[in-house]
């Protein structure tokens, strides 16, 4: 955590003493960003997180058109207003930008990193914190997902999977090479739903991640799926979990893909469950493009996205009467409240539940053998 007696990101580690700078303002700002990057790396934050935060700070610097030692809360207010009123960014996105800017300002104003003294010496002023409680958003809700996002109904899901299968047959009959990727993606969508997986979780699966469940031998070699690239907490590696197979059709589609179709890709050297024609494994952009293509071709709700397969998994298990705690463990949620956010039970399910409760109550009231107090 300490380099040469100084904490990572300290000014003197990025600016040499006694060396004149050709473009002092640009070079000091770049050194600040580099130091901030080192500080975040020391906290074990993901590179994607660090890169995203740096882009947000650079975007604010371009909007303000001044360097950090001249930033003010008023400039931050103008940028936040532009993000919401002009660019129409989502609330969660704006708050992420605010947190990135707050973190950078906290870093450059901390005396331990010596940037205030460095700026005073070079520019006669110093940076200040521009993000405060009175000009930034507060996260108060458990979920801020777009209200349009929802789970598939069973009919929609069947329609989507049938269409994906039809595209494989159509391309193959036409004698085109694209039937292999179409088959892969159709199977991938079904596996993502049948295990309730996120996009990157299903993308990063290897052949070795499938195994037997001794308590459910009827599923053969596909009774359990080991997820090794689950959603990580800040500063932590990807979270692992095992997901048990619950539907009898899942082993059948996996066996068909692994034994009969996947070898046609010619990627015997790749451990990936879903290889690509030009890379070791399929890209997230390919998944999104194929999913959107099928959804739009069917005229389905734009609120249905790849993550809707995971929402559907939770919803359909709950509707089928599975224990909520079991569902929570399957999808890897730490808290039951998170699982409840994913549960989008249909109006039909709610009506059946209400009808069953009313019938039970009425039956108990009319039962002549019912004990009374």
Image (tube, rainbow, N blue to C red):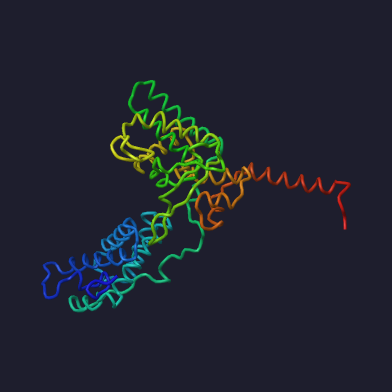
Q: Is 89 positioned to the left or the right of 337 in the image?
A: left
Residue 361: x percent and y percent? 78, 48
User: Would you identify the image quadrant in which residue 131 lies?
Assistant: bottom left
Is 241 above or below relative to 21?
A: above
Q: Is 120 positioned to the left or the right of 321 in the image?
A: left
User: Which image quarter is the N terminus in?
Assistant: bottom left
User: Would you identify the image quadrant in which residue 233 lies?
Assistant: bottom left
Residue 290: x percent and y percent? 39, 37
Residue 285: x percent and y percent? 35, 42
User: Would you identify the image quadrant in which residue 167 lies?
Assistant: top left
Residue 150 in view of the camera: no
Residue furthest to the front in view is 214
Is 92 above or below relative to 212?
A: below
Residue positioned 15% across, 69% down in the render:
24
Q: Is 190 positioned to the left or the right of 36 in the image?
A: right
Near-viewer residue (76 or 176):
176
Residue positioned 41% across, 67% down in the render:
136
Residue 214 in view of the camera: yes
Residue 26: x percent and y percent? 18, 65
User: Which image quarter is the C terminus in?
Assistant: bottom right
Near-viewer residue (323 or 373):
323
Residue positioned 64% across, 41% down in the render:
348
Near-viewer residue (86 or 149):
149
- How many numbered badges does the structure rendering display? 0
């Amino acid at each position: 955590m300490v380099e040469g007696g100084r904490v990572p990101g300290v000014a003197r580690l990025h600016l040499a003493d006694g060396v004149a700078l050709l473009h002092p303002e640009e070079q000091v700002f770049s050194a600040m960003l580099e130091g901030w990057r080192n500080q975040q790396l020391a906290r074990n934050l993901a590179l994607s997180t660090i890169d995203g935060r740096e882009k947000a700070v650079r975007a604010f610097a371009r909007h303000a058109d001044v360097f950090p030692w001249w930033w003010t809360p008023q400039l931050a207010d103008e940028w936040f207003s532009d993000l919401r009123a002009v660019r129409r960014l989502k609330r969660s996105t704006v708050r992420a930008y605010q947190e990135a800017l707050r973190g950078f300002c906290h870093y450059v104003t901390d005396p331990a990193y010596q940037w205030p003294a460095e700026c005073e010496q070079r520019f006669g002023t110093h940076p200040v914190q521009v993000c405060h409680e009175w000009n930034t958003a507060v996260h108060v809700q458990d979920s801020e997902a777009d209200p349009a996002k929802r789970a598939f109904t069973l009919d929609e899901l069947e329609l989507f999977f049938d269409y994906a299968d039809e595209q494989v047959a159509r391309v193959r009959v036409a004698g085109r090479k694209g039937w292999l990727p179409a088959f892969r993606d159709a199977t991938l969508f079904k596996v993502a739903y049948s295990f309730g997986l996120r996009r990157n979780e299903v993308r990063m699966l290897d052949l070795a991640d499938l195994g037997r469940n001794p308590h459910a031998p009827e599923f053969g070699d596909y009774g359990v799926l080991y997820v090794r690239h689950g959603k990580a907490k800040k500063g932590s590696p990807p979270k692992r979990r095992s997901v048990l197979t619950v539907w009898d059709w899942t082993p059948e589609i996996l066996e068909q893909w692994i034994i009969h179709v996947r070898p046609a890709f010619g990627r015997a050297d790749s451990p990936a469950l879903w290889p690509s024609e030009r890379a070791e494994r399929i890209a997230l952009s390919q998944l999104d493009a194929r999913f959107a293509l099928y959804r739009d071709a069917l005229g389905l709700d734009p609120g249905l996205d790849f993550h809707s397969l995971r929402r559907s998994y939770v919803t359909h298990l709950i509707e089928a009467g599975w224990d909520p705690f079991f569902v929570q463990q399957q999808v890897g949620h730490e808290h039951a409240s998170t699982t409840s956010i994913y549960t989008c039970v249909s109006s039909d399910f709610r009506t059946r539940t209400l009808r069953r409760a009313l019938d039970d109550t009425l039956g108990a009231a009319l039962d002549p053998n019912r004990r009374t107090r």
